[in-house]
Image (spheres, coloured by chain):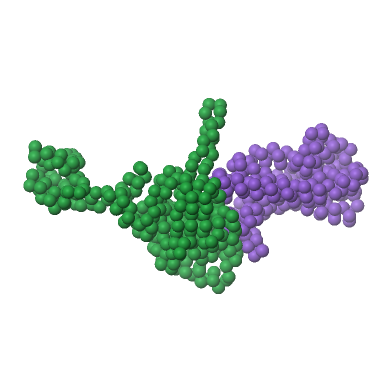
């Protein structure tokens, strides 16, 4: 069942560039006919390089911005037409901007949001307990926001977006700048939310986050959608080869004629300074065969086969 | 309504966080204003009158304009610093909450230190009424009504000026030009100025309609009845303009996101 339905979304920005004394008008096409749907309960990762149109999409879906063409229907509403009704149904975290009251204890932000959203006292208590348990907020509840570390603040921030217990969450870079421990906590919590049936729309630059959480990914580049599907599907689509890495024994880095011939035959890369040979295992090259042949002509210390990383896969997509 | 009270209390509490700073600021504000007041009183006492208006009468219009400003600053800090929200993009956060944006701005930061301005304005009014020997009873009622209109108008003007930042991002210079200067001008009888400034104060930034014209009528210096009802006319005329410009600004923001 669809919760987000985006069709042919378009957005242009007009920028003025100074050229000598004149100002030159230039149109930037931030979104060009983007269409996608998100099902209820889906955990969707939304990625793309800087300036690809991620923020624009989020702003339209959260009701902040009006598109120039196309339509977006979320939970049966048009976000930018019925803003006040719509935002009651969603939770939003902008990793770069805080929505907490800076000078007040964390708890007060929640009380304020409770009043703004009109959350009944009993539901509020229940929700705060739940959030406090899962995000470990107890120790920071009574501290002013300005005294929190980035990791603590981000946990508080997530809780603030959930005071009214929305079904749909938009998270824009919620792990930006976090250390490993804080990040792990945040990701753990997102997984918990997802298991409770929440729909989560996550944008991030960190592909490891995506790998750890999202079943579905959406890739945008130059304002157009380049991929929508599973991560596995993406790897298949890009078809990056696995790599066999051969470490030569210390002192045996200089190759003889046969060695050089091998390198050429397998189109391998060789770095004689550190004695590492990388062979791409595409098509006809079977790892065992390649390894055996190399072992016959060189003195080898170690082998390793690596799968293409998600970073490599995405880098290729971005370059297109 | 509950959310309004909650936000009001939060502002109060946030300022209490910086107690020392709060009291120091209030003190400095008070001293500052008192010196303004002394300067005016000194000038007035040596002139005795400006444009035929007595010292006390001028103090009354001064006070009406100043009081409107003081009450505005009490609630209008968010509007006054609106460009910060534009520059940092924090205005987005107001849009993701189910509440009117102007309401959120007014409650974002209630600046209790501005009570100093309110007290100063009140002191000037007392001085004005005493010095001009205007009949107290009726005049206080009129004063309260005029302060109400002055406050509403100050809000209207400042909402319009804040909305300009939707297009220009920065607007502090425009505020100085369009509001600070006219506010100061409106504290003195408008007929002492040339026709251009007088018309600006009557029709464009119509602060003269909430102080100079009605007070002039009440003291018998202006005879036209229009002068008496001019606060209603000014405030009412400005209202649709305010709403329209704010809405257009929101629309522009939604389409550009800057």
- Residue, x 66% and y 63% (percent of image)? B1
- Residue, x 10% and y 47% (percent of image)? A293
Determine the colour of chain A.
green
- Residue, x 92% and y 44% (percent of image)? B223
Kindly give the residue lying farthest to the bottom in the view shown: A122
- Residue A320 is situated, as x and y percent measured from the top left of the image, at 36, 43
- Residue, x 69% and y 37% (percent of image)? B177
Kindly give the residue lying farthest to the left in the view shown: A296
Give the mark count: 0
- Residue B27 is situated, as x and y percent measured from the top left of the image, at 68, 50
The answer to whether residue B190 is left or right of residue B109 is: right
Which chain is assigned purple? Answer: B
Quarter holding the N terminus of chain A? bottom left
- Residue A92 is situated, as x and y percent measured from the top left of the image, at 50, 57
- Residue A100 is situated, as x and y percent measured from the top left of the image, at 53, 57
Residue B81 in view: no
Determine whether B186 is above or below B18 in the image.
Answer: above
Front-most of residues B6 and B231: B231
The answer to whether residue A291 is left or right of residue A162 is: left
Residue B247 in view: yes
Determine whether A43 is above or below B117 in the image.
Answer: below
The answer to whether residue A138 is left or right of residue A289 is: right
Front-most of residues A103 and A58: A58
Front-most of residues B107 and A17: A17
């Amino acid at each position: 069942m669809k919760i987000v339905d985006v069709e042919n979304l378009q957005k242009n920005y007009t920028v003025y560039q100074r050229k000598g004394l004149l100002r030159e008008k230039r149109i930037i096409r931030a979104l060009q006919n983007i269409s996608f749907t998100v099902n209820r309960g889906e955990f969707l990762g939304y990625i793309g390089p800087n300036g690809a149109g991620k923020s624009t999409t989020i702003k339209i879906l959260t009701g902040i911005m009006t598109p120039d063409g196309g339509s977006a229907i979320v939970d049966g509403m048009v976000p930018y037409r019925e803003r006040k009704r719509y935002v009651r149904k969603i939770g939003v975290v902008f990793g770069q901007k805080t929505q907490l009251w800076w000078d007040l204890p964390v708890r007060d932000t929640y009380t304020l949001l409770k009043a703004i959203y009109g959350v009944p006292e009993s539901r509020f208590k229940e929700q705060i307990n739940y959030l406090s348990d899962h995000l470990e907020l107890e120790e920071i509840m009574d501290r002013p926001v300005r005294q929190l570390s980035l990791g603590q603040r981000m946990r508080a921030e997530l809780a603030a977006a959930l005071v009214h217990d929305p079904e749909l969450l938009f998270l824009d870079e919620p792990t930006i700048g976090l250390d490993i421990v804080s990040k792990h906590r945040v990701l753990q919590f997102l997984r918990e939310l997802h298991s409770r049936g929440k729909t989560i729309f996550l944008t991030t630059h960190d592909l490891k986050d995506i790998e750890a959480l999202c079943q579905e990914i959406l890739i945008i580049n130059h304002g157009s959608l380049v991929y929508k599907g599973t991560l596995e599907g993406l790897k298949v689509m890009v078809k990056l080869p696995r790599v066999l890495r051969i470490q030569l024994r210390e002192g045996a880095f200089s190759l003889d004629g046969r060695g050089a011939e091998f390198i050429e035959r397998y189109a391998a890369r060789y770095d004689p300074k550190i004695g590492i040979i990388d062979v791409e295992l595409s098509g006809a090259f079977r790892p065992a065969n390649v390894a055996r042949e190399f072992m016959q002509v060189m003195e080898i210390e170690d082998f390793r086969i690596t799968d293409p990383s998600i970073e490599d896969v995405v880098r290729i997509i971005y370059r297109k | 309504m509950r959310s309004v009270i909650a936000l009001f209390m939060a502002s109060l509490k946030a300022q209490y966080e910086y107690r020392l700073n709060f009291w120091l600021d209030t003190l400095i504000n008070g001293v500052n204003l008192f010196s303004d007041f002394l300067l005016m009183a000194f000038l007035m006492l040596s002139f005795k009158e400006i444009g035929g208006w007595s010292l006390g009468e001028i103090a009354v219009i001064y006070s009406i304009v100043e009081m409107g400003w003081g009450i505005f600053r009490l609630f209008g800090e968010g509007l006054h610093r609106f460009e910060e929200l534009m520059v940092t993009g924090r205005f987005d956060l107001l849009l993701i909450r189910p509440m009117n944006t102007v309401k959120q701005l007014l409650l974002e930061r209630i600046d209790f230190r501005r009570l100093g301005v309110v007290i100063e304005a009140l002191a000037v009014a007392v001085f004005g009424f005493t010095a001009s020997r205007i009949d107290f009873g009726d005049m206080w009622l009129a004063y309260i009504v005029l302060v109400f209109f002055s406050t509403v108008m100050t809000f209207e003007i400042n909402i319009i000026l804040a909305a300009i930042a939707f297009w220009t991002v920065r607007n502090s210079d425009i505020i100085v030009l369009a509001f600070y200067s006219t506010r100061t001008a409106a504290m003195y009888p408008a007929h002492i100025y040339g026709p251009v400034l007088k018309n600006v104060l009557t029709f464009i930034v119509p602060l003269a309609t909430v102080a100079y014209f009605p007070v002039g009528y009440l003291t018998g210096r202006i005879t036209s009845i229009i002068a008496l009802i001019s606060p209603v006319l000014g405030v009412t005329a400005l209202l649709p303009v305010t709403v329209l410009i704010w809405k257009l600004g929101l629309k522009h923001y939604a389409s550009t996101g800057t």
